[in-house]
Image (cartoon, rainbow, N blue to C red):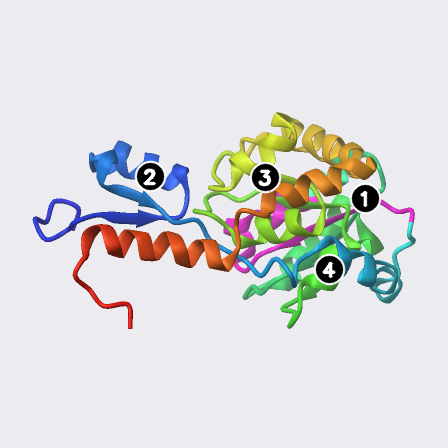
């Protein structure tokens, strides 16, 4: 596919994926176009977090002053829920971990959390219709993924205020690192992830962090994504109709 003469360009959603195409397939960087994912910035907001925070924690049985990490993603192995559990157990701050998303064997992760010592501090919510209340309950998002091109959950979390701890295999790693480079680790670096979680919780305790996180998310609106995509079509199909 990448060597076909019919291929005019490749659209990617992160610089990480662009680098992968160049490195693994020798595809010309000049013919790669970046179109990042977009989210609903009105739905995911600091105001929504403030509105839902107390009720969400109350529903989960979590005290308002307890440190809380949120894991969000389907396919728990690839997204790194096992490492999230281990990281929260190693952090030494009595961290609660909420996990949302779907998986074929959620019971295995509940058992892992029990063995790791999280016990009642592990809240396996599973698939949810609306993730906003869970972002509201969280102090940080933890996503120790093996590989993820550009997960919207990172932008959603930042838009609501929590800092994000993720890995070098995440296409949104550059956004997380803008808050602090310690928030991006190798997915198998247990000490690095534990230190990163402690740093993320420290950042979350500062009121200015939420505003900074929100500003990082603001360029990633749905309108911006559509505009980027239309620009690609205009560049390579200039005679097409926008009707």
Q: Earlier in the sequence, mark 4 or mark 1?
A: 1
Vertical placement of residue 34 versus 22, above or below: below
Tell me, yes or no, whether the two marked residues, 1 and 3, touch with CB atoms within 8 Å. no
Which segment did they paint magenta?
65-85
Q: Which residue is mark 1?
A: 95
Q: Nearer the viewer, mark 2 or mark 3?
A: 2
| Nearer to me, 120 or 66 | 66
CA gap, disc 1 to disc 2? 36 Å
Residue 136: quadrant of the picture: bottom right
Q: Earlier in the sequence, mark 4 or mark 3?
A: 4
Q: Residues within 10 Å of mark 2 (few under 14, many from 20)?
A: many
Determine whether label 2 and label 3 are within 8 Å by CB. no
**Residue at x 10%, y 53% (from the top left corner):** 6
**In this picture, is 222 found above or below 140?**
below
- For the residue carrying disc 4, how many other residues have a C-alpha within 10 Å: few (<14), some (14-19), or many (20+)? many
Q: Which residue is mark 2?
A: 18
Spatial CA span between label 2 and label 3: 19 Å
| Percent x, y of residue 109 | 65, 56
- Distance between mark 4 and mark 1 Cα atoms: 15 Å
| The C terminus, quarter of image | bottom left
State which quadrant residue 72 falls in: bottom right
Would you say the residues marked 1 and 2 are in contact, meaning their CB atoms lie under 8 Å apart?
no
Kindly indicate the quadrant of the structure image that contains residue 50. Answer: bottom right
Tally of marks: 4
* Element marked by disc 3: strand
Q: Nearer the viewer, residue 17 or 31?
A: 31
Q: Which mark is residue 166?
A: 3
Q: Any magenta on residue 30?
A: no
The residue labelled by disc 4 is 134
Please give the name of the residue rendered at 58% of the width and 42% of the height, measured from the top-left corner.
144
Q: Pointer 2 and pointer 4: residues touching (CB < 8 Å)?
A: no
Q: Earlier in the sequence, mark 1 or mark 3?
A: 1
């Amino acid at each position: 596919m990448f060597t076909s003469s019919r291929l005019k360009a490749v659209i990617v959603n992160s610089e990480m994926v662009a680098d992968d195409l160049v490195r693994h397939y020798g595809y010309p960087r000049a013919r790669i176009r970046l179109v990042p994912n977009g989210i609903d910035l009105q739905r995911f907001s600091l105001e929504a977090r403030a509105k839902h925070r107390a009720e969400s924690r109350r529903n989960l049985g979590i005290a308002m002053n307890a440190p809380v990490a949120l894991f969000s993603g389907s396919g728990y192995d690839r997204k790194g829920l096992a490492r999230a559990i281990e990281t929260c157990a190693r952090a030494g701050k009595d961290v609660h971990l909420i996990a949302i998303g779907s998986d074929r064997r959620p019971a295995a992760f509940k058992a892992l959390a029990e063995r790791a010592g999280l016990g009642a501090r592990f809240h396996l919510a599973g698939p949810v219709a609306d993730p906003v209340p869970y972002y509201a309950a969280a102090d940080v998002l933890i996503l120790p993924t093996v590989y993820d091109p550009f997960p919207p959950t990172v932008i959603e979390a930042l838009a609501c205020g929590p800092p994000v701890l993720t890995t070098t295999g995440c296409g949104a790693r550059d956004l997380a690192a803008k808050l602090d480079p310690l928030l991006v680790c190798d997915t198998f670096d247990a000490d690095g992830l534990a230190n990163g979680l402690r740093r993320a919780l420290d950042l979350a305790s500062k009121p200015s962090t939420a505003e900074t996180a929100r500003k990082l998310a603001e360029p990633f609106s749905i309108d911006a994504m559509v505009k980027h995509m239309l620009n690609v079509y205009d560049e390579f199909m200039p005679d097409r109709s926008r009707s």
